[in-house]
Amino acid sequence: MAPASPLVAAWELGIRLKAAREQVDMTGTDAAHSIGVTQNYLSNIEHGRRKIAEDKLTALAGTYLLDDDEAAELVELRKASDGRGWWSRYSGLFAPELLRYFGFEHGAEEIRSYESGVMSGLLQTRDYAHAVHSGDRANLRGSEIDRRVEARQMRQHRISGSDPLRAVIVLTEGVLRQQVGGREVLSGQLEHVLNMIHAHSDTLAIRIIPFSAGSYGAMGSSTFHLLTFPSPRLRRLAWHEAVTSLNLIDTEARVHQYSLSFDEALDRAADVEASEEIIRDALRSIT
């Protein structure tokens, strides 16, 4: 079971309110008018971007003719959405869309990640993460680096915590060879990955695409992730990172495209045992 995420709770509440409104064939404008708010206010609630007061929620439940059980479920979701996730303390450091991603990742049940140039943030050692951020002097101030590394370490609780995320992480072999931070830092990083594989074998699978794999659709692509959630009411999300853009993707067709690309990359990857041997070979080559 994934831990509670206020952002995911707000998202599910919004989805269920929109579905309830459409079930009674009511426009957003009419629904907003019925409880004395603007259509924009209600739209933000339905998209999980704004919290709703309990009295307004109760009024909507009556307008939408919801039964007592469903109305009570929505009240519980509203309460869950009231909290502040760990990521909120970094609101001045990261873009709002990236903070939203942290919230979704925290409340996800499964992540499927593709990384072609750098070790997955969920697996990075502190030294490796510091070296990654230190290499981005064009976009980061030196004073930001330690806090960004700290946030990356916070994200890793989803792998090693009491409610572990199921993770399938596909890396290209080049990630294992790129000497981020130098030989010593990379060596520590690869040892850490091997330890993680054994410590979390039930929930973590790391698959390596070897240099010999040939071409595939995602080759040369930047980082992307696919997130799945515990509630069947919540659709899968995709997240894509590029040098100058961060995109949270929720349209079904585009998420499906990312899913197909991930499946193809996974098909090119070595199996779990062979992937571990590729990692060990990369480690031997620098020690």
Image (spheres, rainbow, N blue to C red):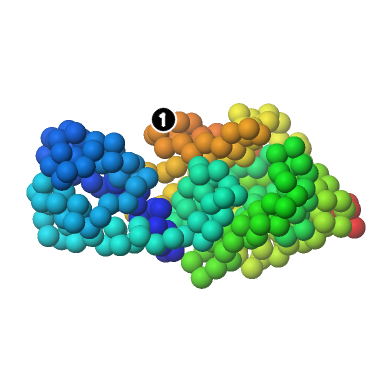
In this rendered view, identify the residue nearer to me: 59 or 248: 59
x and y percent of residue 114 in the render?
61, 42
Q: Is residue 208 visible?
A: no
- Residue at 14 percent across and 35 percent down: it is 30
- Residue at 71 percent across and 36 percent down: it is 213
Q: Residues within 10 Å of mark 1 (few under 14, many from 20)?
A: few
Residue 55 occupies which quadrant of the picture? Answer: bottom left
Q: Is residue 190 left or right of residue 75?
A: right
- Residue at 46 percent across and 36 percent down: it is 249
Q: Is residue 171 visible?
A: yes
Location of the C terminus (image quadrant): bottom right
Location of the N terminus (image quadrant): bottom left
x and y percent of residue 135 in the render?
78, 44
x and y percent of residue 72 in the render?
19, 61
In this rendered view, identify the residue nearer to me: 192 or 95: 95
In this rendered view, identify the residue nearer to me: 21 or 176: 21
Considering the numbered disc 1 on the image, is that residue within a helix, a strand or a loop?
helix
Q: Which residue is mark 1?
A: 253
x and y percent of residue 195 in the render?
71, 65
Q: Is residue 37 left or right of residue 208?
A: left
**Number of marks present in the image shown:** 1
Instruction: Residue type at mark 1: give it.
Output: Ala
Return the residue found at the far bottom.
162
In this rendered view, identify the residue nearer to me: 93 or 176: 93
